[in-house]
Image: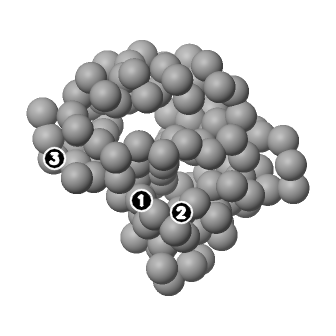
Amino acid sequence: MKKILIVDDEPRVRELLTITLNGIADFELCEAHDGEQAVKISCEMIPDLILMDVKMPGSIDGLAATKIIKNNPKTQHCCIILLTAYGQEADKEKGFEAGADDYIVKPFSPVSLIERIEKEFKIG
């Protein structure tokens, strides 16, 4: 069973993502509400995919968490898709420089997200 970590400070966004993901396949889902928790949980569960918000409160935002996760030999293989309202080209470059595998601008359609996940996991 594929493991997905959902990281967003907004509970409603985490809930929407959970509902969307439960509708396409049987995933083991876990949630984090900030970058610090994302780093901790990713080291414990070693997810196959992380859906990471960029702007979150605390000392570790989504870009910093992505960099930490990608620089850890234990978690560097995790696919990270950044989900963010920042849609400028410079923002995308920062995301990819941090180590993100993909970048989706909010608001996004659930269909678009599902297509990207199906491509990553070769399902559907």
Q: Nearer the viewer, residue 115 or 72?
A: 72
Q: Residue furthest left?
A: 124
Look at the numbered disc 3 and give the secondary structure of its residue.
Answer: loop
Residue 51 position, x and y percent, is: 50, 43
Write the residue at 23% across / 28% down: 24
Quarter holding residue 8: top right
Where residue 72 appears, as percent x and y from the top left, is 57, 79
Q: CA distance from mark 3 to mark 2?
A: 22 Å
Instruction: Give amino acid for label 3.
Output: Lys
Give SS at disc 2: helix
The numbered dot on residue 47 is 1
Locate residue 55: give its quadrant: top right
Along the line of sight, the residue nearer the viewer: 21 or 123? 21
Tag 1, which secondary structure? loop
Q: Residues within 10 Å of mark 3 (few under 14, many from 20)?
A: few
Viewer-side residue, 100 vs 4:
4
Is any part of residue 91 visible from this angle?
no
Q: Label 2 belongs to which residue?
A: 42
Instruction: Tell me the residue at 52%/23% (across/down).
Output: 15
Sequence order check, earlier mark of 1 and 3: 1
In the rendered view, tell whether residue 39 sits above or below residue 62. Answer: below
* CA gap, disc 2 and disc 1: 6 Å
Q: Earlier in the sequence, mark 2 or mark 1?
A: 2
Mark number displayed over residue 122: 3
Q: Residue at x 48, y 46 (%)?
A: 30
Q: Which of labels 3 and 2 is toward the front?
A: 2
